[in-house]
């Protein structure tokens, strides 16, 4: 197996896990967050900057890299790491999320999913075996089973059919694997606890080196998300990593760490940055707002980064003037803050005070304010 995972400590106050994940390209303390590099780039940042604001592990998107430039071209470079000049670890998703997000451009069959290219309309076909082959070409350290990510409020009948298919696809992907890349199974089942348990138990029987939880942060409420992760916490193997896919809001990170999650990824910190929303140790700031026009303090006085060289007034000006530097600086800030948050969470777990830390965060920031 190309990865090794061990739980180092369990927080006596919260039950959260501190772990160590060893991959071919780095050893990482968990829980951690992975920036998303959909197209083999974390948007607006170069690899040295990504290294500074990440734990050293990022995510690439199988579907998008298959479509452009093509997994054969990336394979010719020696894999995704040399292709994008990245010397850290990489996780690739399987394309299963695109089954959810490209609903109007795909048709699901037992063999796989027929897509229409999201730009040209050309026909594409992705099967469990093809998803594995593409990920082998990309050469990531950790890869994902091909699954269907269903909308959260589908009928139980639909969900049952979907879960059964996802399980068959997981087995087919496992059988197709020819490398020692770490292939994770993905637990689906929507908000139905019976189906979630059934899917988890069947995947555990297949003995994957790690387990992802999919189908969350796709339209359900935060309370519903937390209920699912809390439910799966005692079911998933204690000694294997748990990866919650597509979740990255600061409040969701700490809430799901408390519910046993070790790994996260999400486009939210980088996407929101490009629209002018900054994540700071004091809370969320929409830098384009008028109130920052004459605000001459730095964006985040409690987090020293290169962004600390600029005032909020200047950052607002960059966005109003549509200058690319604004997007770059806020992207750097947001990922630096998430890295800082995960370091603080790990320290709080070590010191058995994660619930205390959460209470402090609730008082000092606006991340937990619900509309």
Image: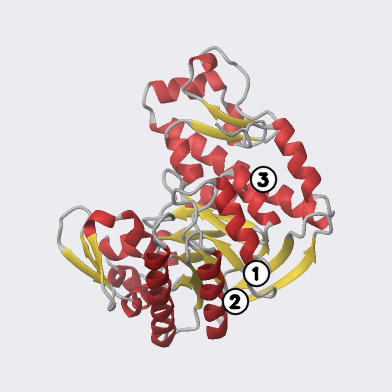
Which residue is denoted by mark 3 in the rendering? 340
Position of 336 relative to 123 (above/below): above
Q: Earlier in the sequence, mark 3 or mark 1?
A: 1
Q: Earlier in the sequence, mark 3 or mark 2?
A: 2
**CA distance separating discs 2 and 1:** 7 Å
Instruction: Examine the image and state in which quarter residue 120 appears.
Output: bottom left
Q: Which image quadrant is residue 193 in? A: bottom right
Q: Nearer the viewer, residue 141 or 211?
A: 211
Q: Which residue is mark 1?
A: 21
Mark 2–mark 1 CB contact (< 8 Å): yes
Secondary structure beneath label 2: loop
Q: Which mark is residue 274?
A: none
Q: Is residue 47 left or right of residue 223?
A: left
Residue linked to disc 2: 3
Q: Is residue 21 left or right of residue 138?
A: right
x and y, in percent, of residue 168 in the image:
40, 81
Q: CA distance from mark 3 to mark 2?
A: 25 Å
Q: Quadrant of the N terminus?
A: bottom right
């Amino acid at each position: 197996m190309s990865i090794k995972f061990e739980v180092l400590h369990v927080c006596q106050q919260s039950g959260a896990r501190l772990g160590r994940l060893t991959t071919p390209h780095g050893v990482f303390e968990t829980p951690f967050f992975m920036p998303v590099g959909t197209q083999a780039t974390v948007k607006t940042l170069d690899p040295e900057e990504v290294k500074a604001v990440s734990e050293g592990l990022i995510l690439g998107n199988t579907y998008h890299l298959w479509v452009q430039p093509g997994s054969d071209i990336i394979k010719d470079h020696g894999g995704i790491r040399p292709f994008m000049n990245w010397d850290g670890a990489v996780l690739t998703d399987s394309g299963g999320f695109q089954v959810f997000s490209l609903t109007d451009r795909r048709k699901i069959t037992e063999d796989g999913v027929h897509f229409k290219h999201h730009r040209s309309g050309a026909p594409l076909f992705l099967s469990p075996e093809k998803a594995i082959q593409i990920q082998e070409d990309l050469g990531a350290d950790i890869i994902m089973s091909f699954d269907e990510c269903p909308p959260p409020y589908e009928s139980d009948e639909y969900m049952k059919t979907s879960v059964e298919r996802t399980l068959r696809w997981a087995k087919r992907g496992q059988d197709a694997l020819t490398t020692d890349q770490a292939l994770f199974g993905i637990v689906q089942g929507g908000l139905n606890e019976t189906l979630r348990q059934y899917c988890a138990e069947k995947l555990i029987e297949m003995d994957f080196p790690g387990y992802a939880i999919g189908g969350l942060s796709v339209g359900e409420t935060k309370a519903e998300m937390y209920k699912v992760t809390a439910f799966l916490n005692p079911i998933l193997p204690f000694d294997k990593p748990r990866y919650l896919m597509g979740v990255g809001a600061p409040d969701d990170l700490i809430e799901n760490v408390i519910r046993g999650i070790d790994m996260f990824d999400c486009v939210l910190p980088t996407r929101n940055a490009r629209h002018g929303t900054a994540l700071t140790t004091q809370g969320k700031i929409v830098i384009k707002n008028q109130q920052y026009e004459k605000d001459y303090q730095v964006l985040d006085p409690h987090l020293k980064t290169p962004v600390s060289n600029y005032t909020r007034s200047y950052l607002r000006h960059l966005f109003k003037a549509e200058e690319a530097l604004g997007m770059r600086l806020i992207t750097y800030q947001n990922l630096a803050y998430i890295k800082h948050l995960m370091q603080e969470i790990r320290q709080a777990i070590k010191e058995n005070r994660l619930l205390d830390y959460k209470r402090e965060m609730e008082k000092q920031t606006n991340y937990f304010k619900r509309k």
